[in-house]
């Protein structure tokens, strides 16, 4: 039911609903009404008298639209003589003229092209935001294929993951550099003195040098 808000959502649902009822009804909106005709005895095509209408001739899509709008919107379209005129009037009212629609499309296309996953945003929220953009574009006549939309989502998600990965590496580097500045808190297991590791211990190095000298003397 349309109350004057979120027209693009209502339009998409009404399009599906009318097409599911009868695609001929949707043709009346797209192409306009065509009065039923018959061929007379002389082979001429003339308008069919109303008393000879069959059920298919009496299908009026205006009723479907009227039942899906509130009283304010009904007042807006009540003077229209066809379903196409009703539909077009609502389109112009809520989507604007062709120039306005083009401006809206350009704005939404920019949002689509620059779409990215926000920090602290989960996948569900991101996908909902992306779907809102593509649905709005579709309502204005700009349609992307499923493969195009999937590629867009995957590219943006990969960039987001790469950004997160880079951020973690940066954090690790920062953490290590800070730990190195606190080297004085480290205690050597060789001499029990702070400020260096066992592998850097001067006592151990001195012992190794002494052993090397003794080996050199024995060799001579």
Image: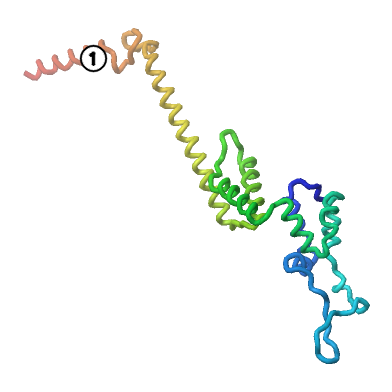
**Residue located at (77% from left, 68% from top):** 28
Residue 80: horizontal and vertical position, in percent?
82, 61
| Mark 1 residue element | helix
- In-image side of 87 versus 194 (left or right): right
**Residue located at (73% from left, 68% from top):** 31
Q: Quadrant of residue 52?
A: bottom right
Position of residue 192 relative to residue 151, above or below, is above
Q: Nearer the viewer, residue 7 or 170?
A: 7
Q: Nearer the viewer, residue 11 or 132?
A: 11
Position of the C terminus by quadrant: top left
Res. 12 visible in picture: no
Judge the density around disc 1: few (<14), some (14-19), many (≥20) Cα neighbours within 10 Å.
Answer: few
Which residue is farthest bottom?
Answer: 42
Q: Quadrant of residue 60?
A: bottom right
Residue 18: horizontal and vertical position, in percent?
78, 62
Position of residue 134 relative to residue 206, above or below, is below
- In-image side of 150 versus 23 (left or right): left
- In-image side of 208 versus 13 (left or right): left
Position of residue 164 relative to residue 19, above or below, is above
Say which residue label 1 marks. 205
Q: Nearer the viewer, residue 8 or 207?
A: 8
């Amino acid at each position: 039911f349309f109350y004057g808000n979120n027209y693009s959502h209502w339009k998409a649902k009404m399009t599906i609903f009318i097409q599911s009822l009868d695609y001929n009804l949707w043709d009346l909106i797209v192409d306009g009404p065509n009065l039923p005709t018959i061929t007379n005895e002389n082979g001429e095509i003339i308008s069919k008298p109303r008393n000879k209408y069959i059920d298919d001739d009496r299908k009026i899509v205006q009723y479907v639209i009227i039942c899906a709008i509130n009283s304010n919107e009904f007042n807006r379209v009540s003077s229209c003589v066809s379903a196409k005129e009703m539909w077009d009037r609502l389109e112009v009212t809520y989507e604007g003229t062709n120039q306005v629609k083009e401006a809206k499309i350009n704005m939404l296309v920019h949002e689509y092209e620059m779409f990215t996953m926000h920090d602290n945003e989960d996948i569900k929220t991101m996908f909902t935001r992306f779907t809102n953009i593509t649905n709005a574009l579709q309502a204005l006549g700009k349609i992307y294929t499923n493969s195009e939309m999937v590629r867009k989502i995957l590219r943006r998600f990969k960039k987001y993951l790469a950004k997160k990965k880079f951020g973690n590496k940066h954090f690790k580097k920062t953490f290590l550099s800070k730990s190195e500045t606190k080297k004085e808190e480290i205690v050597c297991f060789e001499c029990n003195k702070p400020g260096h590791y066992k592998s850097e211990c001067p006592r151990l190095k001195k012992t190794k040098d002494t052993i090397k000298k003794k080996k050199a003397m024995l060799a001579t």
